[in-house]
Amino acid sequence: MAIQGWFSRAACAAALAAVCAVSTACGSPSTPTQWTVINHWMIDAVTTKQAPLALQCLLIDVNPTAQSVVSSAQLQTPSLYTRTFAQREVQLGADTLEFQLHFNAIARRSIRGAEPTLTIATPRWTHSFSFGEMDVMLVQKRVEWLLPLRSFAGQSGAFSTSHVFAMAVKNPRPHAVTFDGFAVGGGVEIERTAYVVHPSELPLDIPHQARDLRAPLVIAPGQTVALYCTFRQPSVYRNVYFQPALQLTYQGQSGYELTNPALYTETKFKGDPTAIYPTVNG
């Protein structure tokens, strides 16, 4: 699987175009335009009131017309404030448009089990859809004790409920920093935490030489460590926004170091993707 934060546009467009071609020739005047919302998101994050969540969603339009425009999009839940919204339109082919919807959102408080609503408006229709589930833990003490070197942006491919998150960090401090484990929002289940000291690379899967974290890991000054965790999301959610935090201790003080989000997205479909994701004709 390719490491990436967004859906493989070519794969998604090909699947949707194939569905269209089964019944009629795409692009003909009699073929209605069909919109597909790629939702079913599991959002699991650890953050602060000041750090935004870069939430995302795709909207695919097959057989677009002059009315194929996203007028507005709103992501709504009582505990979430959307600071900014932006969109990007991508022409995937003669008969397919992709709208990349970006929401820069702030959590007002910790969130557990919230179900955000995504409302999309075009010149021809306005509908609300389930975005998925949101579990966010707000922390008070954010620290920057470790130097992040690299982290996964996520991966795309066939639907899976189990994923690997990885990042490499270095201790730039004059004293040791202790890694106590990954903190999560509460919607996913951590199945394994492992590490490699002085890694030569950061592979997609946990390497065979990785050691399981059975006690706090002391990272010496100047030392580089690759940190891994395997997590599982509920099977009802097909796409995952995962942003854990590192629980750390330094010189008797504890804190949380935030990470960049990783997106795990479904791009390979066994059948008709419109049987999985909501569609709107017109």
Image: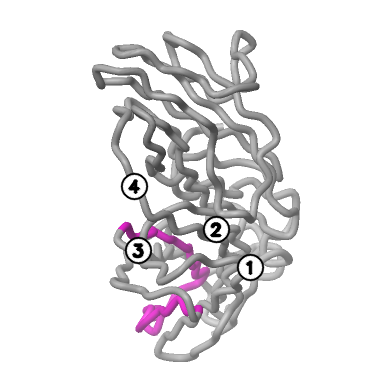
Give the answer, above or below, for where 30 lies relative to 262: below
Q: Is residue 104 left or right of residue 18?
A: left
Residue denoted by label 2: 43
Helix, strand or loop at label 3? It is loop
- The reply to whether the C-beta atoms of the residues labelled 4 and 3 are less than 8 Å apart is no
User: Is the residue 265 above or below the residue 115 in the image?
Assistant: above
Name the residue at 47% across, 27% down: 179
- The amino acid type found where label 1 is placed reads Gly
Task: Please give the residue where the numbered disc 4 appears in the rendered image.
Answer: 142
Residue type indicated by callout 4:
Arg
Q: How far is mark 3 from mark 2, CA to CA? A: 16 Å
Q: Which mark is residue 113?
A: 1
Earlier in the chain: of badge 3 and badge 2, it is: 2
In terms of sequence position, does the residue under pointer 1 or pointer 2 come before the other?
2
Viewer-proximal residue among 115 and 119: 115
- Measured as percent of width and height from the top left, residue 73 is found at 41, 79
- The residue that disc 3 covers is 49
Q: Mark 3 is on which residue type?
A: Lys
Q: Secondary structure at mark 1?
A: strand
Q: Which residues are magenta?
A: 51-77
Name the residue at 64% across, 55% down. 187
- Measured in 3D between alpha carbons, the distance from the residue under mark 1 to the one under mark 2, in whole angstroms, is 10 Å
Work out which quarter of the rendered image holds the N terminus and state it: top right
Q: Is residue 160 visible?
A: no
